[in-house]
């Protein structure tokens, strides 16, 4: 207790310097946490993917569709339990700024493959019955203030025209990492309209979602599927849902590397600032440390004083930065809208924030503590005059 009181008194002896150092630490730890959370949000789709779902797409490109008659052949593949499909709709709600994912799906088979979408039974049944119905995630509904029964007009880009859907259900994610920023509509409704307007574009799907019996069979099932459609007019590429999501993340890999580098640079910069603070502190108290050694205190006691003071300041700044990260992350989440379907500060990020703060404190005190432990008593006392 005596040592802690001494450390606390020493840490705030120069209030302005300590205050500025704390502000720098809080800003650095906050920025480190937010940047780490952005990187985590980018990978949220990968982490939220299922190991028992495969995605079958065109071997040429995701923009090339697959024929609908692949569905029964996929169901016959050994290891396949469920098959569904989806098309990217790409509509505009009021303005292009209101971007969110929209998929035309086969409702019954699709929702069976995604049990993490928790929709009340009555809402799910209403969606199944209404071919112009749609369901959305809770986050998306809250953003636009949608309620059950609302009309949602979408201006088509891939599918020309204005399409109006009736909101029949709102799902809540089973876990925090479940995506709640999508809109799902009936593929059959879109396909019917295409048959009347653009017959050559009907009876085609963007991707197939395949449910398998065992995660360990993913590679084998994928090979069977691709082999079955080899040398056809629409060859396939089958991959796990996580690999499919990673293919999108890899497009912005350079940005993610830059963000991670910036987060580390921020920590290094504040480490240099903290080291300068502790060096100035040690130099000003040279005579005090020499007096302590003259009174019989060991060099280890002097080291503990400097390390303790540095770690105390770092811990205070780290905790304050950690606490401030939560409201800042909430504000960023609101501003980003549906850009990041899942944006939350993880337990790992919080642990890394505290570890970074303590690491800064330890490294900053290392050099001045070593110097003060080796100080000559006479030279130190002479420094008083």
Image (cartoon, rainbow, N blue to C red):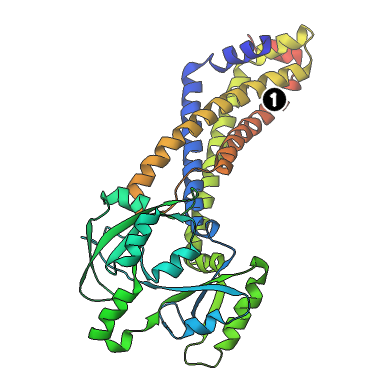
Determine whether the residue tagged by mark 1 lies in a helix, strand or loop. helix
Task: Compare residues 57 and 96 and report the one nearer the observer.
Answer: 57
Tell me what residue is drawn at x 57 percent, y 83 percent: 226
Q: Residues within 10 Å of mark 1 (few under 14, many from 20)?
A: many
Tell me what residue is drawn at x 33 percent, y 62 percent: 127
Tell me what residue is drawn at x 77 percent, y 8 percent: 294
Residue 65's spot in the image, x, y percent?
41, 82
Up the image or down, 229 lies above or below 357; here it is below
Residue 64's spot in the image, x, y percent?
41, 82
Q: Quadrant of residue 151?
A: bottom left
Residue 116's spot in the image, x, y percent?
49, 56
Quarter of the image containing the N terminus?
top right
User: Is residue 100 visible to us here?
Assistant: no
Quarter of the image containing the C terminus?
top right
As drawn, is 2 to the left or to the right of 161? right
Task: Compare residues 19 and 236 and report the one nearer the observer.
Answer: 236
User: Is residue 135 visible to us here?
Assistant: yes
Q: Quadrant of residue 121?
A: bottom left
Task: Compare residues 279 and 115 and report the one nearer the observer.
Answer: 115
Tell me what residue is drawn at x 58 percent, y 87 percent: 228
Residue where numbered disc 1 is placed: 369
Up the image or down, 124 lies above or below 276; here it is below
Q: Which residue lies furthest to the top in this view?
A: 295
Residue 70's spot in the image, x, y percent?
48, 84
Up the image or down, 154 lies above or below 337; here it is below
Q: How many labels does the image show?
A: 1
As drawn, is 347 to the left or to the right of 326? right
Task: Compare residues 41 and 275 and report the one nearer the observer.
Answer: 41
């Amino acid at each position: 207790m005596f040592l802690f009181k001494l450390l606390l008194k020493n840490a705030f002896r120069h209030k302005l310097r300590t205050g500025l150092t704390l502000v720098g630490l809080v800003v650095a730890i906050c920025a480190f946490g937010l940047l780490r959370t952005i990187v985590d949000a980018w990978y949220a789709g990968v982490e939220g993917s299922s190991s028992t779902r495969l995605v079958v797409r065109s071997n040429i490109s995701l923009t090339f569709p697959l024929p609908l008659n692949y569905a029964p052949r996929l169901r016959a593949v050994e290891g396949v339990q469920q098959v569904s499909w989806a098309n990217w709709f790409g509509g505009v709600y009021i303005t292009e700024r209101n971007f969110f994912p929209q998929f035309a799906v086969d409702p019954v088979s699709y929702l069976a493959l995604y049990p993490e979408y928790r929709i009340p039974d009555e809402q799910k049944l209403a969606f199944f019955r209404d071919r112009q119905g749609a369901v959305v995630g809770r986050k998306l509904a809250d953003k636009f203030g949608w309620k059950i029964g609302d009309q949602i007009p979408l201006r088509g880009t891939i599918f020309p025209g204005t399409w109006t859907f009736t909101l029949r259900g709102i799902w809540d994610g089973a876990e925090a990492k479940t995506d709640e920023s999508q809109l799902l509509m009936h593929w059959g409704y879109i396909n019917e309209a295409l048959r009347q307007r653009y017959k050559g574009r009907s009876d085609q799907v963007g991707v197939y979602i395949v449910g398998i019996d065992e995660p360990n069979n993913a590679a084998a099932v994928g090979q069977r599927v691709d082999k079955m459609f080899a040398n056809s007019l629409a060859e396939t590429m089958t991959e796990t849902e996580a690999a499919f999501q990673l293919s999108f993340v890899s497009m912005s890999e350079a940005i993610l590397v830059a963000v991670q580098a910036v987060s580390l640079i921020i920590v290094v910069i504040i480490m240099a600032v903290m080291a300068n603070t502790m060096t100035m502190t040690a130099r000003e108290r040279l005579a005090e440390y020499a007096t302590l050694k003259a009174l019989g205190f060991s060099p280890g006691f002097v080291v503990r004083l400097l390390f303790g003071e540095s770690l105390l300041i770092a811990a205070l700044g780290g905790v304050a930065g950690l606490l401030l990260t939560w409201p800042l992350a909430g504000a960023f989440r609101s501003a980003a809208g549906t850009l990041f379907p899942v944006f939350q500060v993880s337990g790992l990020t919080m642990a890394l924030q505290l570890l970074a703060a303590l690491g800064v404190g330890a490294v900053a005190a290392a050099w001045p503590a070593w110097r003060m432990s080796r100080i000559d008593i006479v030279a130190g006392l002479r420094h008083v005059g």
